[in-house]
Amino acid sequence: MKLFNGERKVIIRRCDSYDRQTIHDIIRQGFEELGILPRGKILIKPNVVTANKDYIHHSFTEPAMLEAMVDTLRQDFQQHQITIGESGGIGIPTRMFFAESGIQETAENLKVPLVDFNEEQAKVVSLEKAKVHKTMEVAKSLYAAEFKIWMPKLKFHIVTEITNTLKLNIGILNHKERFLYHDDRLHQKVVDMLEIGYPDVIVSDAVTIGRGFESSPYPVHLGAILIANEPLACDMVAAKILGYEPEAVRHLAEARDRGYGTLDFNDITVTGDITMEELADRIKGVDSPFQDLQKLDTPLAFYEGINKKSGNICYGGCICSIKGALGTAEKRSPGTLKTAKKAAIVMGYYDGDVLHPEDTVVMVGDCAGVSGRLAAKKIIRIKGCPVKVKDLMIFLLVRIGVKSPVFDLRNLRLLIYYSLVSGWMKLTIPFRKKARLEKP
């Protein structure tokens, strides 16, 4: 387990726009203050969980942040072995999100390799300190990296309150392993990933943050960049800015309990030209929809159940997937939830009655059930553990009167095209590996 030895420091800098030169200066000055000296094979890990040119614009690290980082590495530190890598969300090819976010064009202009971890040679690594994720398939650009720069996008999160440095590590997993333990053990899974995904420096995009479903968020201007030399310290500051005490964020408390750092602000140094309190005031009272399904303006009724094996609310599993599917649908077609059919959605094993004799009842997840009475005009079962957002968009939304983004003609064309390309790249991994080995 990698541990940080030294002064834990977070720098908060004002940054009101995505001006490339301004961000370059902020990063360079931050590196100098922290004594950061990037060397060797450098991996930049942004947040590219989703993107769509039509309606998803603030879920990803802005390309200008990546441009400024590469400028800093090349111009100020004479480093040129740079790779940008990511594994996008929702089981959709990451290439699609690279293209839709503008990051593909940015990487091409910068002449920096851009890799989807799902399409690379990988090796299985044992995680010695992990609680649930005992092994991990680690992509080549990740295990070969000698210096890791994590560039998260600061956002509210529908189940983990915040997403910043630690939560960014879900994107180092390939799609096959991303959904493992993505249930009531999500906070443990996130901390397990630190064993592989421990960054040397963090530069967090907090210029425009996201509220609501983090993969299809609504923008909030915050006007800041966070630079830190220790992941837990960075996320403590991020949590405070978003209005949370660090101890209330489960994955931060888990990381503290495992010895990855402190949650005591007296043990870290925070500097810069704007304070946590000033930034927190800028977004005081900001509502982040989809964190509480019961507050949604919709005829749909929600019954949040437990993981039957553990007895815990399955916040990171099917509840998360339902929030994600509905959040994306509403972002694509504002008002679609309000005009949905009257129906009930049961996620996991619900302790109580579900009485909707005139309506459809949807049972989401392998363990979905009801301990009490169940009355329904029709029952729909969607299997999975957890059910994937993509599957809900394809097989559920239209059946409950919600417009599904998947069936948007442009989205459908993109999905088919990039699925074919990505599928081919995965099939040719063994041949590309052999070609490299035989190259003189």
Image: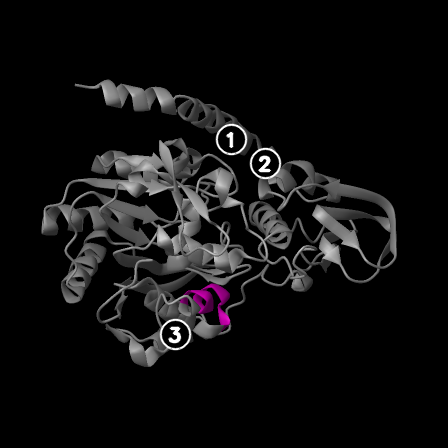
Magenta range:
248-255
* Camera-side residue of 332 and 247: 247
From the image, which quarter does the N terminus lie in?
A: bottom left
Q: Position of residue 321 (x, y in %)?
A: 60, 49
Q: Is residue 181 above or below residue 270?
A: above
Mark 3 secondary-structure assignment: loop
Give the left or right position of residue 241, taking residue 89 as reference.
left
* Camera-side residue of 116 and 230: 230
Q: What label does residue 406 carry, if any?
A: 2
Q: Residue at x 38, y 65 (%)?
A: 235
Are the residues flagged by discs 1 and 2 in contact, CB closer than 8 Å? yes
How far is mark 1 from mark 2, CA to CA?
A: 8 Å
Mark 2 secondary-structure assignment: helix
Q: Position of residue 335 (x, y in %)?
A: 64, 51
Q: Earlier in the sequence, mark 2 or mark 3?
A: 3
Q: Is residue 314 above or below residue 412?
A: below
Give the left or right position of residue 319, taking residue 98 as reference.
right
Q: Position of residue 31 (x, y in %)?
A: 17, 60
Which of labels 3 and 1 is toward the front? 3
Which of labels 2 and 3 is toward the front? 3
* Camera-side residue of 433 and 166: 433
How far is mark 3 from mark 1, CA to CA?
A: 42 Å
Q: What label does residue 415 carry, if any?
A: 1
Look at label 3 and name its amino acid.
Leu
* Residue 304 falls in image quadrant: bottom right
Residue 315 visible: yes
* Residue beneath disc 3: 263
Give the left or right position of residue 150, taking residue 80 as reference.
right
How far is mark 2 from mark 3, CA to CA?
A: 41 Å
Residue 244 visible: no
